[in-house]
Each structure stands twice: as structure tokens, then as C-alpha cells.
Image (cartoon, grey):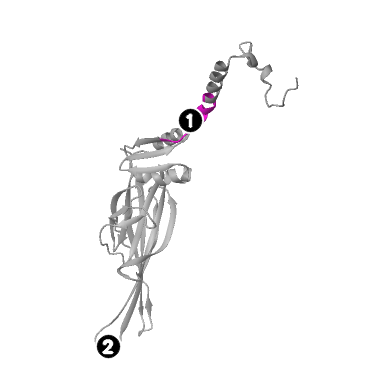
Amino acid sequence: MKRSRTFCRCDTLSIDGIPWNIMKPANRNLILICLSLLLAVPAALAAPESHVFELENRRAQTVVPQLRNLYGEEIQLSPDGQNLMVRAEPEQLAEIKTLLRQIDQPVRQVRLSLRHRDMASGENDNRGSKRVYSTRKDSTRSLVVQDQQIAQISSGRIARLPVAARGGRNPMVILEEVDMTSGFLVRPSVLSEDQVELHITAIRKEPVPGQPDYETAGVVTIRRVNPGEWVELGEERRSARTQQGSRAYSTQSKGSRLWEVKVNVLPAR
């Protein structure tokens, strides 16, 4: 008898010494069902699952960008307060659990210290003489902020900028009306005990079209510094011209003020 070609020679297959071709149909069906279940187990194990992670020190919204950078659209993230619901494959959930354990640490605090130095020069036009003088005035002010919190430096004052995080193109929104006509915005990021990254934004004196109450941000500088190191924020220039009475005498003075900031990482609580 001529046999047809198949991928498997069933007459040579045997289980526990019993050839497949003489096995009872009921036993064959049972074996096929078991094989199907065994093949389906890996697929079932890899199916996405949902899990809610409870954070102790961080808000869930703050860790979403880091997870999104790592996994992209492969996982689904739903932050709610300090709870983060993640839908992903079991292997990914195990990785995310380990990552969140490393990320969910108490927020570090840093002390920002601000000081300025005044340099000035005087010039007498009518007398034909020129006198240059310099004054140095160190006035240090300090403020404790949290890691990633923005501080505003303006007119010799340093204060926390009242902002809140949100989604969309503009990740932050100012909660209160703040004078943003001049000065600097400083945001410290603690990289380690020995290194801090400073995001420094200089505010230009140019109004934003359609927003007369606020000014646009100027040059942005990112610097990595050591704790305790004074860093130059920028220079503020000023000039004034005076004339005394009817005398043909005028004096013009020019000067600049150099602003510096220092950051110290406070011990973890």
C-alpha cells in the first residue's frame, strides 16, 4: 500500500511503547489537547498584565517620563497621586518594579546661596580727567529648595517660583502672577553627592507679544558643578547720567553687578 507524504510519520510515533497508529482515538485526542495547552503556556505568560505600584516618596506623574523614555509605547501608564498603574508584560513589570525601587527615594534638598559683586567706573567729561574706582560688596542670601524646584533670582532676592507640573507642550504653569521682567531662574538637579546640574535661565527685558505682564526667557545655560562651588549666573549692567544745576558739568557713571550662586546638597533625611 502506498502511503501519502506527511510532515510526520505517525506509524513510527509511539508513546509509552504504544504506536500512534494503533492508539485509541480518545487517547489521541487527549494527547493533542495536552500538547496544545503546553504550546499555549508561553503565550499566556507573555500576555500583558496590569499592576498598581504604590510610591512612598514620589508622585507617580514625576516618574512617568523616565519610564516612557525606557519603554516608549510598549507599556501603558496611568498615574494617580502616588499610585502608578502599569500595563505591560510580566517580564517588563518585574523590571519596572526594580526601577521604581531605585527611583522612589526621598526628595533631596539643596541650599542655594546668592551673592553679588559691584564693579563701577566714573568719568568726568569736562575736566578732561578720568577716575576709575571699584567697590566690592558681598551680600549673601540663602534659600532651601527641593531637587528640581525652580528658584527665581531678581533684584537681589531669591525665592521659590510657584509652579505646578502639567502635561502638554508647556510642562509647567505659574500658579501666581510673578514679576518676570529681569533676573534669573535656577533649577538644581542632584546627580550625586558630589555633583549638581544647574539649569540657569536669564530673563530678558523684552515683552512677549500678547502678554504684556510677563517677559520672555533669554539664554539658557546648563552647568555641572561641585557642591560648595560659586558659579557665575551673569552680569547686570547699569548706567546713569547726572547734571548739577546750571553748571556745564555732567558726570556719567557706568557699572556692572556680577551675580553668583552656590549650591550645597543637604543630608538625606
The secondary element bearing badge 1 is classed as helix
State the residue in front, 111 or 188.
Answer: 188
x, y percentage for residue 249?
Answer: 30, 85
Is residue 206 depicted above or below 125 in this figure? above
Q: What mark, if any, has residue 247 been given in the picture?
A: 2
Q: Main secondary structure of the magenta part?
A: helix
The quarter of the image holding the C terminus is top left
Q: Measuring from the top left, give residue 123's x and y in whole percent.
A: 36, 78
Residue 187 locus on image (x, y percent): 36, 53
Q: Residues within 10 Å of mark 2 (few under 14, many from 20)?
A: few
Please tell me in which quadrant of the rendered image residue 214 appears: bottom left
- Residue bounds of the magenta highlight: 37-49
Question: Left or right: 28 with respect to 194?
Answer: right
At horizontal 35% and vertical 74% (from top left) the residue drawn is: 254
The amino acid beneath tag 1 is: Ala
For the residue labelled by badge 2, is the local secondary structure a helix, a strand or a loop? loop
Residue position for label 1: 44
90 within the magenta span? no
